[in-house]
Image (cartoon, rainbow, N blue to C red):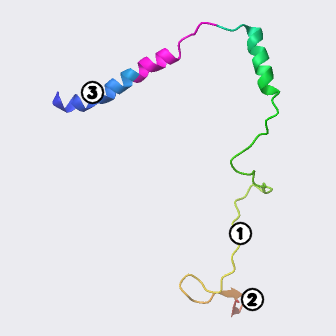
Amino acid sequence: MEILLWLVPAGVVTLIAMLWAGWAGRERPVEASREDAVRHLERGLQSSRPVRYAAPTPARDRSTGLAVRPSRRTDTAVGGARSETLSQDGSTRPTG
């Protein structure tokens, strides 16, 4: 039974959260009429405040549906050896 005592703090926090959620989500008495709410909404929508965002919208690239990484030209391969290409006649030649 002692081993389950560590569950008590979690249970208390859960119970408090359940009580708070029930209280916060309760139905409140209606104080304003529907017409007042519509007028308030209309005033808010007609305000001429500029919309500002934290970062500028990036320019979108045209998607081709394929994930293509940008090509990088390197003169050496991973191990430090020079890379070679196969020419049309079947012989290899160094690139770069």
The label number, if any, that marks residue 87 in the structure image: 2
Instruction: Give neighbour class at mark 2: few <14, some 14-19, many 20+ (Cα, 10 Å).
Output: few
Q: Quadrant of residue 62?
A: bottom right
Alpha carbon distance from label 2 to label 3: 74 Å
Mark with earlier residue (2, 1): 1
Which residue is depicted at the point 48% across and 20% down?
21
Which residues are the magenta region? 17-30
Amino acid beneath label 3: Val
- In this view, which residue lies farthest toward the left? 2
Which residue is depicted at the point 69% across and 66% down?
69
Mark with earlier residue (2, 3): 3
Q: Nearer the viewer, mark 2 or mark 1?
A: 1
Q: Which residue is mark 3?
A: 8
Alpha carbon distance from label 2 to label 1: 24 Å
Please name whichever residue, 38 or 43, is drawn nearer the observer in this view of the structure.
43
Q: Which residue is mark 1?
A: 70
Q: Is residue 93 above or below residue 79?
A: below
